[in-house]
Image (cartoon, rainbow, N blue to C red):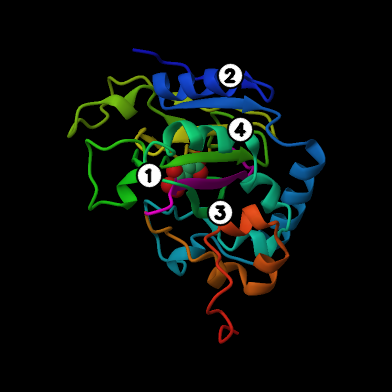
Amino acid sequence: MPSALRRHSRDVDPASLAASLERDGGAIVQRFLEPEVVSALAEDYDRELAAVDWCNTKGGLTDTFFGARTKRLHGLLGKSPHFAEAVAHPLLAALCEHFLRPLAHDFRVSTGELMAIGPGESRQALHRDADSWFHYPPPRPEILVSANLALTDFRTENGATVLVPGSQAWEPGRKPTDDDALDHAEMERGDALVYTGNVFHGGGRNETEETRIGLYWGYIPSWLRPLENHVVTNGLPAIEKAPKRVQELLDYKPEGWDAFP
Ligand SMILES: O=C(O)CCC(=O)C(=O)O
C-alpha cells in the first residue's frame, strides 16, 4: 500500500500525473501557478477573509465538519478575477480528459471554496468529496477531479490536508481506521494538491498560531449538477468578463439571465 504522495513539477507529463492519481488518489504539483498569480489571489481573498467570522458558512455555530475555527468563501471569481487562471489550468484539463472524458462530452466546475484553517482547529473527519452526490455511491468511477492550491505554506503542524493514499480504490463500505497510513500534503505556497473524489481526506489539525489557506475547486462530468450555481454566487458581471472556456466550465449559458439582478 503506497503511503506517500508523489511530487511532480508543473511541466510533468499529464499521463504521469494521471498515473499518480490512479495509484494514490492524489499527488502534489509544485509551483502550480505563477507566483504573481498566487500573490494576487492571496491578496484578493485575504481582504474577503478579514470580513468574515470563523465558521461563517454555519452562521458561527460550532460545526465539527465545516470547522469551528475555519472560514470558507464561495463566489471566488467574483472575489478575484485571477480565479479564472486557476479554473483554466491545462494540467487540470488533462486530468479531466483522463478521468471524466470517458463519462461525458464535457466538464463543469462543481464548486470553488477557499478554506482558511485557523489556530486551534481540530482535524476534520476523513471523507470522500464524491459523496456529495450521495445518491451515486461507490462503486462508482471517479466523478470529481479537484485541486487545493496552497495560498500559504501547508505543514503538518498548521493543518496541511490529510489524505489516505490508495483509499480511492477500496472496496465499497471500507472506512479508514487508525491502522491506515495517512499522508500530510506538505506544500510550499503556490504548490497544489490534486486529487480525486473517491479518495479519503480531510483538513488537518492546526496546532500553530498561523492560518493555513487553501484554494479548492473541482470538476465533474457535465451531466452531474454542480454544487454551486456560479452565476448566483459570483454575479453576472464577473462571469461575463471571464474567457469563454471559463464561462463554459462555470456552467454559464447566456440565455435566461436577463431578470437576474
Ligand atoms: O482544507 C482542507 O485541507 C480540506 C478540507 C476538506 O476536505 C473539506 O472541507 O471538505
Position of residue 208 measured from the top left corner of the image (x, y, whole percent): 59, 38
Tell me the number on the disc at residue 7: 2
Label 3 sits on residue:
249
Disc 3 to disc 1: CB gap under 8 Å: no
Say which element carries label 3: helix
Query: Which comes sooner in the sequence, label 3 or label 1?
Result: 1
**Range covered by the magenta-colored residues:** 208-223
Q: In terms of sequence position, does the residue under pointer 4 or pointer 1 come before the other?
A: 4
Q: Mark number for residue 129?
A: 1
Q: Quadrant of the N terminus?
A: top left
**Disc 4, SS:** helix
Mark 3 vs mark 1: in front:
3
Please identify the quadrant where the C terminus is shown. bottom right
Residue 151 lies left or right of residue 158; in this view the side is right
Residue 121 seen in the current view: no
- Disc on the earlier residue, 3 or 4: 4
